[in-house]
Amino acid sequence: MVTRRQVDVVVVGAGMAGMCASLAALEEHARVITLEKGSRCGGSMTLSSGLIWTFRDRSQLHQQIPDGNPVLQDLVLDNLWQGLAWLEGHGVALEEEREFMGHGRGRAAGAAHLAEVLADRVRALGGEIALETPLDTLLYEDGAVRGVRTCGPGGAPPISRPGPLYWRLVASRAILSCWCAT
Ligand SMILES: Cc1cc2nc3c(=O)[nH]c(=O)nc-3n(C[C@H](O)[C@H](O)[C@H](O)COP(=O)(O)OP(=O)(O)OC[C@H]3O[C@@H](n4cnc5c(N)ncnc54)[C@H](O)[C@@H]3O)c2cc1C
């Protein structure tokens, strides 16, 4: 069975990028659904020390990561501190600014705390986070991606069970992919 749903924004992946993207869209009063294939939010950030940092300056950044996209690199460098203030505004408790191994500076938050606060904020602003709901297929219309089909909610149904449940999500404003296919 396929259930059709209409939202403004579909975010795929509830890692750090996906939850920040969801929050930003909710701030713009969009109807947002965040799809996460796993059973919890936070992605690889939950394995990290939670230090959000960037390099000291452009030349060091471009030298250390020569194959990176310079436009994106500059965006991070120029906006990190503003972004950290935005996270604090959403209730994330950040430690004092500190040095990172001679490369640059940043501020840390406990990884579990960060994941929990962001997920709570997404839900508090009316967003929906669908866990165990992986993106299955992109839906095209007139050559553009207009929606997605998911396996689930609740994960792909067992092969033995007939009549699989799927969501067909149509997005009127944007579909944001916040995961890497590896
Ligand atoms: C051990 C470790 C330590 C680190 N330490 C630091 C650090 O101290 N400081 C720092 O800045 N960075 C650190 N990093 C890197 C940082 O954690 C990552 O760059 C960042 O968390 C990536 O976030 P993301 O949201 O872009 O991607 P991800 O965290 O990869 O999130 C992607 C999400 O998408 C979901 N997903 C995947 N496929 C699908 C699908 N088909 N449908 C739905 N959902 C899907 C995944 O389950 C995941 O939750 C560390 C990373 C690791 C692994």
Image: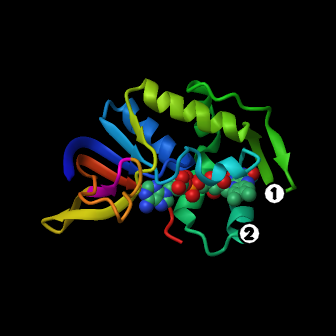
- Tell me: 11 left or right of 41: left
The three-letter code of the residue at mark 1 reads: His
Residue assigned mark 1: 103
Residue 154 picture location, percent across and down: 40, 48
Q: Is residue 48 above or below residue 69?
A: above
Q: Residue at x 53, y 47 (%)?
A: 39
The three-letter code of the residue at mark 2 reads: Gln
Question: Residue 64 bears which disc, if any?
Answer: 2
Dot 2 beta carbon under 8 Å from ligand 1: no
Q: SS at mark 1?
A: loop
Residue 34 quadrant:
top left
Q: Is residue 54 visible?
A: no
Query: Majority secondary structure of the magenta segment?
Result: strand
Dot 1 beta carbon under 8 Å from ligand 1: no
Q: Which residues are magenta?
A: 148-153
Q: Is residue 35 above or below residue 103?
A: above
Give the color scheme: rainbow, by chain, secondary structure or one colour. rainbow
